Image (spheres, rainbow, N blue to C red):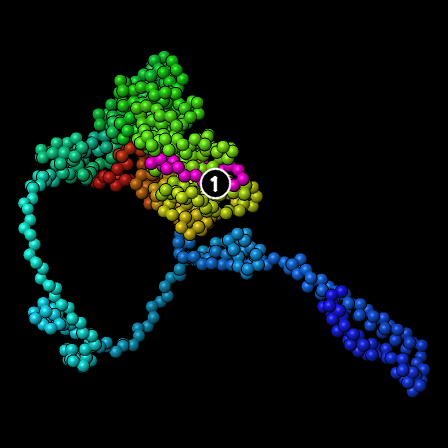
Amino acid sequence: MTGGRLTTIDALFPLMQTSASQAGLQPDNQREEQQEEQPQQPPHHRHRRWFTVLQTLTLVAVLLLAVYNHALIEANPEETLATPWLVESEPFEPLAPCNEGGSRVHTGFDVDGNGLLDVGERMDTVVLCNGMRGLSGPQGQPGESGVDAVPQRLETTALPVGNTSCPQGGIMMHSGLDLNLNDELDTEEVVNQTVLCNGLVGAHGFNGTNGTDGAIGAGALVDKVAAPAYICADGFLVRFGVDDGATDGEAHNGLLEQSEVRETLNFCFEPLRSERVSDVVSGAGDSMTTGCDQAVWSEALSGFFFAANDGVNGCELHVHHPATNTTAMVVDLHPSGDALPGRDLGFTLVNDGERLLFDATDGATARQLWVSDGTSEGTEALGAVEAWKPLAWGNGLLFRSTTNQLVWTNGSSLESGLTLPSWESEVAQAVQANLSGLSNFGDAWIHTDDQAVWFSAADAGGDVEPYRLSVSGELTSWTVNDFGSTQLSDLLTVDNDLVAVGVRGGVKQVIHLHENGSHTWLTSIAPASGDTHLGEGMGLHLIGENLVFDAVTTGNEARLWTTNLANGITLQLSGVMQSPGAQVGVANTGERLLFDCLTPTHGMEVCTTDATPQGSHVLHDLTPGLMSSDIRGFAPVGEGWLVVSSGSVDGSPQGLALWAVEGTAMRLAYDPWDGNGNSSQALMYGELVLSPTQAWFIAHDGEHGHEWHRWSHGELSDDWIVIHR
């Protein structure tokens, strides 16, 4: 035993002796004296003494065990102390989605025992938003009038030239309080005195040389022209411009040419025109079917290009020119069958809209990438490509070849790999050297924006991580997973950074890839079981600094969530809206999102959010009650939207039609097949296509089959002033 233990036990002996004395265990000489003085005790008294002895011995044993246990605790304190569980809170400023501010409550084990809950020790974080500010209380009774304040006065005195203080003259300023209220600043009332001196007069400068005559300035012009007939049958445009010959005009000719127009005011005296524009198959036949329903508007070529079958030449490339109200086939690529233009890659514009790129087959070869200037002579094949949606990058488009290699084109030729022809040779060589150790470019995922292409690639060890190649040739890499590959989806550019959905701990979360090569996990949503399935329904969308997405926590039903990129707050926006964007998708105006969602009381309807809980709700119950609306498509127009859906007007069921959303109001805009019980089957084929003045979609009018229709959206986008006479 150690000295500490001996000391502890020795200290018990006086206590043991005292206890023995109290129990009747005296020394022998004392017992003999007492036996002589007292008569012999009865037998039951002796039994009581032995019982007392037994109790004392038991007490001694217990004390010894306690001492031993105390010694063990002192020897191994670490084995008995539990790790403390801490709860900490921190406030945050009023920022969306907590517009009144709030607090974050962190809980976890204080593993390092420093009395603080470090970031790595936080096991759970709960965000508590402050409630909305209450209404102002009633105005109080007027207070008693105060004493009038003493007037302040400022007086100035001019200092003449030659003054001692200011040789060039100046001003003396006195300020103070007019205590005697005589409207003058007496000497004893002056509090502050300031002198402002004039500067020295500069020397005469050198005479300047005669300047050259400036160019003759262009005159401002205003004129009035008739409104385009395909938009407005009765109206005019007031045009404002400068006679400077901008682009391809002639300067100083006194005429306001189209390229010289700066602004216009558009007036129409009847509703803007909306109508069917094509009838490629004459009569009730369908000109558009699955695989033959792609389209795009080219402002540079002033035409609406689309795939259609005329019943004779098969599915080929056509164009409609609204200004002349004419429709024609551009080229018959497959003379003996269907070219099916745009079936896999769709239609994409390059070279400022002067060239149209699409996939098609001529029957002699497999599907190839084609380019067209809108004429038969200007349509040619560029080469074979894989069925992979093109991505805009570096003033061109990025494709994937049939040999699984990335190729780039600007509409003139195909370039292999991640190389831009605009690079200097030194830059191109440096890029190739940096990429030489990588493989499988973009096999897992790829994303482009105005500044860079983001892609997955495998290093020499087979580890797949994110990379970014800018249009100037700079390569940046990230290591997100130290022990394996990184899989990303739903990529979204934010300034020069990227946010995406990644997997962390087997659960999908939002990750932020910073331009400098670092990364941050933005969310830590904990599902009750399984995965969050984050972004699988509606993807990621940005409203200001708020990222909006869908995620699953309970019940296997996705809900609407948001994360603020500035403060990191993550909140569920609604507990009622289910499966947001899962059926149709999302349309973003930059201020609000429009999407389909399912609610227990409305069924499937059109929903909206501005990234706040109070701004997340069903926009309009098109089909009242529990019945769902047949929603087919969305498109943002200005600060509003266009929706193709079934619905109800004044209690009467409405077939598939085009609806306009302005603010919180939703109105029927255009029904291709009007009448009770009729359905235009809008967007059975194709998608909503927007041009600067029109919204285009495929619908059935009951007489001409599935054809292209257009609706002039100028009133919704505030481009036209409509005056009903």
Q: Pointer 1: what residue?
A: 479
Boundaries of the magenta span:
469-489
Residue positioned 27% across, 34% down in the render = 692
Residue positioned 5% across, 50% down in the render = 207
Q: Can residue 534 be seen?
A: no
Q: Is residue 433 left or right of residue 354?
A: right
Q: Is residue 290 left or right of residue 113?
A: left
Asked whether residue 528 is drawn in magenta, I would say no
Q: Residues within 10 Å of mark 1 (few under 14, many from 20)?
A: some
Inspect the image, locate mark 1, and give the three-letter code of the amino acid beneath it. Thr
* Of 574 and 390, the residue lying toward us: 390
Q: Quadrant of residue 170?
A: bottom left
SS label for mark 1: loop
Give x and y (percent) for residue 303: 26, 27
Q: Quadrant of residue 622?
A: top left
Residue positioned 76% across, 65% down in the render = 1
Residue positioned 35% across, 45% down in the render = 591
Q: From this viewpoint, which residue is outermost toward the bottom?
A: 37
Main SS type for the magenta part?
loop
Q: Quadrant of residue 609?
A: top left
